[in-house]
Amino acid sequence: MRALAVVLAGSLIASGCAVNSYRIPPGELAHLTRIPPEARGQHVRVIQEIVASDVPAAPPVTDETQIVFAPSLEVSVAGGHRSHGGGFGGVKIGGAGNDGKAAAVAFLFIAATALLTAAVVEGSRFDGYARLHPMHPVHLIGHDGGYTVVPLAWLDPGAVAWADTAVVRPGEGPWHQLERAPLSRQGLAYGMYGGTGSLRSAAGDLAMGPAWTVQLGYFPTQQLGLFASVFFGWRNNRFDATLFESRYTAELQFLPVQLGILHAGLFGGAGVAYRFEDAVKLAGDRVIAGNEASSALVGGAMFQLDINTRIALTARLGLTQAHDEQMHDAIFGLSVY
């Protein structure tokens, strides 16, 4: 679902970003089976869908609907029906400094558009907890493509093991939206950050210029993530010509510290760096070639302030070893999970 936030940019914003149906995550589905049927609708984790699951409508329940504990489950498979009694079965950009800068600006514009779309989509959809009637219909789609709809109170471990997707709809019963869930990083992640960084010229001088990083990756756990990272930086050198730096690295992020909505951790990675610099000259007729490639080591500290379950403001203080020199940057931006 998070990847679709980037792919479906224009259409999602135009259509209101998210649909009025919700998934129950597999872990929550299993947790619900351990709660007494009459109480399991009090605090249910739900995630609003971006694209609605293709399931038929179910008869709605009301606050007065009686709780029934004898299930009669039906699964449709390949056009037929069968009944169950509870069991389920690093690319170099440009050639010259000025050309590289122009290509980077175009890339950053596209990246910023994708980030804005992802932030609007993920920020607008609800990811948190709702209170439901115990007989609220739960649409289950099996790993084999089968389908059934059961009341929340009828879920059992067999149904959970069979189901690949569980969907609930607010219009099919009493629906009381409760609190949002805290920041969740697990799954795909996308971020873009801008600020300032020091860039070393082939002529030897070190000065500050605009610095940008775009990242796409995955968090297998809440604290640990692996990313592909692209860095662009540029400035004018002492000859008033363009110095352009690009880096392509694989990066590991670890954020073990949390104090309320503030999170902190470290990042580190390795890859390649390219420097393209125009009109690099020394005294007399000597000329230094400004174009150079080298390995790159990156690392530093990062801090996050969570906005909601899917979005965080991120600040990074980084140090880079490339071209036999040390450079640093301070950048700030948005992370979308």
Image (cartoon, helix red, strand yellow):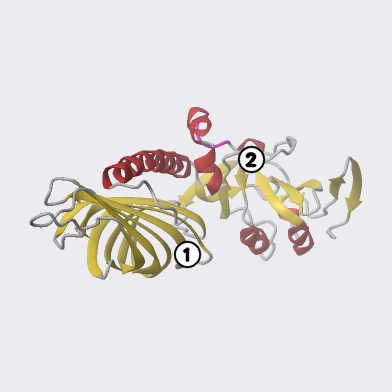
Q: Quadrant of residue 256?
A: bottom left
Which residue is tagged 1?
226
How many numbered marks are there?
A: 2
Above or below residue 19? Residue 274 is: below
Judged left or right of residue 67, residue 191 is left
Q: Amino acid at mark 1?
A: Leu
Residue 83 visible (yes or no): yes
Residue 235 location (% of width, % of height): 19, 49
Residue 192 location (% of width, % of height): 36, 50
Residue 30 location (% of width, % of height): 67, 63
Judged left or right of residue 220, residue 193 is left
Q: Nearer the viewer, mark 1 or mark 2?
A: 1
Question: Quick one: 67 or 207, which is closer to the camera?
Answer: 207
Magenta residues, start to end: 15-19
Above or below residue 244? Residue 204 is: below
**Residue drawn 16% across and 60% down?**
203
Residue 47 location (% of width, % of height): 56, 48
Q: Amino acid at mark 2?
A: Arg
Q: Mostly what secondary structure, the magenta segment?
A: loop
Which residue is tagged 2?
169
Residue 336 visible (yes or no): no
Judged left or right of residue 246, residue 48 is right
Q: Secondary structure at mark 2?
A: loop
Classed neighbour count for the residue bearing mark 2: other residues with Cα under 10 Å, few (<14), some (14–19), many (≥20): many
**Residue drawn 35% across and 67% down?**
296
